[in-house]
Image (cartoon, helix red, strand yellow):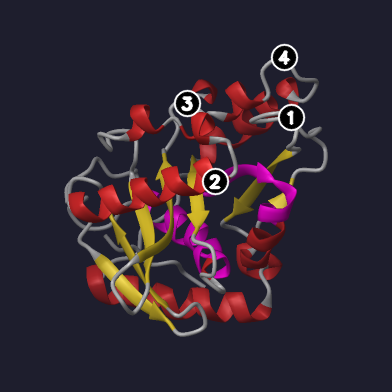
Amino acid sequence: MEFIASADAFSAGPGFAGDGRLPRVSYADEDGGCTVVAATPSAEPGLWHEYLCGARESYRRFGVEKALGIDGMRDGRSTAVFFTAVDGAGTVVGGVRAVGPFRCVEDSHALVEWAGQPGLDGVRAMISARLPGGVAEMKAAWAARGAGRVATTLARVAVHTMTLLGVRFVMATSAAYVLDRWCSSGGIVADAVAATPYPDARYRTRIMWWDREDVLVNAEPGQALKIAEETAVFAASVGGVPEAQP
């Protein structure tokens, strides 16, 4: 299967279709009881603000607001695209942002998370090996309490991020219980890299990778079908198919 792009103006990756502009794209997900909106912060500043407020509240609830680094991301410049889940009342009930494509290993926040830990060299090696194919990273994911299957809905946007940025690989770091949900969309936890106690000793943060070459093989059947359906929405919005970096 080919993955189709959607997509205010930001500097597109080598595989991006059209003129490199990302229009506001949305699609409904009945299972999640929400509408997913993909956009850039400059194109949807109001939605971006709501996403940031929700992320801050969610991280604060778990006592890890400092790890969010919201001051450094508030202007949106480091975010290539962000996704929000909006419920029937128009409330943002979840979201995640994407950073990339990476120019070098040091672009990944994972180096901060594994600093001083035994797995740091392994993290560096994994990112370095994948850079030629293009790497992006999912960050600041959250879902509101009582938001049902929104986390499962948002798990699929890692695949759409590969499409939008023209990269072969997407990575994410999080606690195991979060990554367990994201595995449903074809992500694979890197067991070779030891967990890190980040953002504090209560957590065992792991690293996960999605590979555009086999993501649909690794995804749960229901998620793979949803990915294909949502890909068609992106195709209708842009009308072009970006190729991953060689």
Residue at numbered disc 1: 197
Q: Are marks 2 and 1 in contact (CB under 8 Å)?
A: no
Tell me, yes or no, if residue 214 can be seen here: no
Which mark's residue is nearer the viewer, 2 or 1?
A: 2
**Residue 161, located in which quarter of the rendered image?**
bottom left
Sequence-wise, which precedes: disc 2 or disc 3? 2
What type is the residue that disc 4 sits on?
A: Gly
Near mark 1 (Cα within 10 A), the count class, few <14, some 14-19 or many ≥20, is some
Near mark 3 (Cα within 10 A), the count class, few <14, some 14-19 or many ≥20, is some
Q: Is residue 196 magenta?
A: no
- The dot on residue 61 is 2
| Residue 71 location (% of width, % of height) | 35, 28
| Residue 240 location (% of width, % of height) | 28, 66
Residue at numbered disc 4: 116
On the rendered structure, is 228 left or right of 37? right
Sequence-wise, which precedes: disc 1 or disc 3? 3
Q: Are marks 4 and 1 in contact (CB under 8 Å)?
A: no
Near mark 2 (Cα within 10 A), the count class, few <14, some 14-19 or many ≥20, is few
Cα gap from disc 2 to disc 3, whole angstroms: 28 Å
Tell me, yes or no, if residue 49 can be seen here: yes
